[in-house]
Amino acid sequence: MKQNILKRIFIFATILNCSMFYAQEHEYTFKNYDWNEKASIEIPEQYKNEKEVILDRIMKIEIAVAGKNVKQYRLLHEKIFINSDDAIERNNKIYIPFGKNENVIANKARVILKNGKIITLEKNDIKEENDEEKGVKYNYFAINGLEKGAVIEKFFLLEETPDLNGKTYKMQDQYPIANLNFELIYPEHLIFKTKNYNGLAEPIIDSKKFEKKSVLSISEKNIIALNDDEQYSNWDVKLKLFRYKLDGNTYSGANNLYNFKEFATNLHERLNPALDKKEIKTIDDFCKSIAKSNDIQEQIWNIENKIKKTIAYGKYIDQKTTLSDVIASKQASEIDILKLYLAVFKNFKIENNVVFTSNRYKIPFDKDFESYENLSDLLIYFPTIKKYLTPTEIEYRIPLIPVRLANNNGLFLKEKIFSGVAMGISEIGFIEIPGTEITHDFMDIIIDFTKDIENPSVNSRIAFGGYAGLNFQPIKDFASAEQYKTMLKSVAENYTVETEYQTLTTENDGTDFIGKKPFIMNVTFEGKDLIQKAGENYLFSVGQTIGRQMEFYQENKRVLPVEIDYPHYYTRTIKIILPKGASVKNLDKFVMDFKTDINGKTEAAFNSKFIKENEEITVENTEFYNIINYPLSTFESYKAVINAAADFNKIVLIVTK
């Protein structure tokens, strides 16, 4: 998980200014919390036939203070009813939460079987699992003997760094929750700002339960499940959510803490330090090595390409003292790489804004709730061309940015001059994602029956634009030649129906073309595997030449609206050349017209038609998705558009000599 940049930019002691707290004993109210040793299974009648149910979920978070030492204690206690083979398989490992800034004080787990027998898991039941890709180790309880009708009970108690500048908790799951209880406990002189989402019950504050402490609590019963299996949706942000942040301190008089205005002022000073003569010369020399262009977007592309190819970014790299050290070492931390970009853009006199935002699939930016949790990721915006750059993602180039950061609000940091002094100001804006003009795929296919009606030759030229091309272009620069060849073969198999191709060539592969030109694949192959003989007729699976297509199934009633990654446009042309005297049937199958209209405008469509002139048949179809979010009310028409391509893929022509 990407660490919050703010926790690296601001010293923690500054974030938790000790004037905000008064000393008290370093105690927390649930220090002696434990489960009931005499466990029993009690399943409410309404849940006895469910496959899996969270019977109880208890969450407690306490901010505990001793002098200047501030700690957070977090407890999670759950009981889960297991009543299916899937639930057994899903729960045979209980992962122990343990992060970089966490200390596990207690972790316990047990299984209560239907007959009342209790299996208590011990320390020797804890196993270790390595995620080679992420370079992370996980500890978990390995559960044996789990059966239908059993209950898993677990609780963890952690000591960790406080979440005061913003935190969101999920209060709903993909399984029903019979009882939910949440408590945030904190010194009484602190004030927390909160917000509930998607129908969650309002919190209640109790100032009398504990001496000199306040308890903010939320309780709900019978929270319905929200299935996490609907394609093209954003499940995480449709759950019942609870968000909070520290907002004030009655002792010190501090209020509106962690506001965006203060953030912009402090960060501007940090990102735009005065450069000494050596740094200025180093930046000048560095800029002289960057290719010049009169086109602003191309100039920005050249700058981005130069920095990403010569300076290695790493979030765990130590911050350098000067930009001269960054360029000399060819290594940069997050704050260093951002300072370097800004210094170079200033050298080229390119206006820009630093933009902080969040992952729209996890914690979308809420413009009405000023929280530093909203500011976990960064971009650079160029007002003159209205495009964005992502400074820390090596495989991207302007105008392409990570889709998780677009279609979202962001905090735009701008520089203004007041009485000759440069200052940082901020405003919230919407981050547009590049549209279908960027991600436009073209497919040109020629199918020639003239030499052999039982084995037509197929020639496909496929141009993948924008984000589609980004799936392929960087691989050439980061993989071995053999790995790249294997990848290309795998891609080609999708369009040759796994038939061995005769020729395969590519164009515009490598990072030098990202955001500039489409990735192009040219492939030729024999079409005999697409032919079936049926008496005097030849059945030709022409639809398969456009490649496998997603078929959209929705067995249950749709609950979530549609949300896709990015707008996308497809233009396909298929030319079929028949031998003289041959006839063809089923051409009417090529005529298709499906669309999704929103507010009187067509925002998604699949349209197909054909023209026959003598022995040549030309099929043209277009498919597009102009926007990212489609309301639930349009789901059926959207599903029809998606499935139209899958239906086209199944078209079979009947060819007769």
Image (cartoon, rainbow, N blue to C red):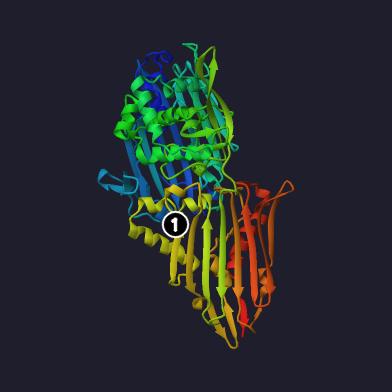
Q: Position of residue 27 (x, y in %)?
A: 35, 22
Q: Work out whether residue 350 or residue 590 is closer to the camera in this orientation and state it.
A: 350
Q: Is residue 311 above or below residue 438?
A: above
Q: Is residue 248 left or right of residue 327?
A: right
**x and y percentages locating residue 264 in the rendered image:** 50, 23
Residue, x 32% and y 46% (percent of image)? Answer: 140
Judging depth in this view, the residue of 605 and 396 nearest the camera is: 396
Is 278 located above or below residue 297 in the figure?
Answer: above
The structure residue drawn at horizontal position 48% and vertical position 28%, both measured from the top left corner, is 372
Seen from the viewer's position, the closer of residues 468 and 180 is: 468
Q: Nearer the viewer, residue 634 or 610?
A: 610
Left or right? Give the position of 239 relative to 476: right
Q: Position of residue 30 (x, y in %)?
A: 39, 28
According to the image, label 1 marks what residue? Answer: 86
Q: Is residue 86 left or right of residue 562?
A: left
Does 56 appear above or below 274? below
On the question of residue 114 being in view, the answer is: no
**Badge 1 element:** helix
The image shows residue 510 at horizontal and vertical percentages of 42, 51
- In which image quadrant can residue 450 be found? bottom right
Residue 19 is at least partly visible in this image:
yes
Q: Amino acid at mark 1?
A: Asp
Q: Residues within 10 Å of mark 1 (few under 14, many from 20)?
A: few
The quadrant of the image that shows the N terminus is top left
Quadrant for the C terminus in the image: bottom right
In this view, the residue farthest toward the bottom is: 535
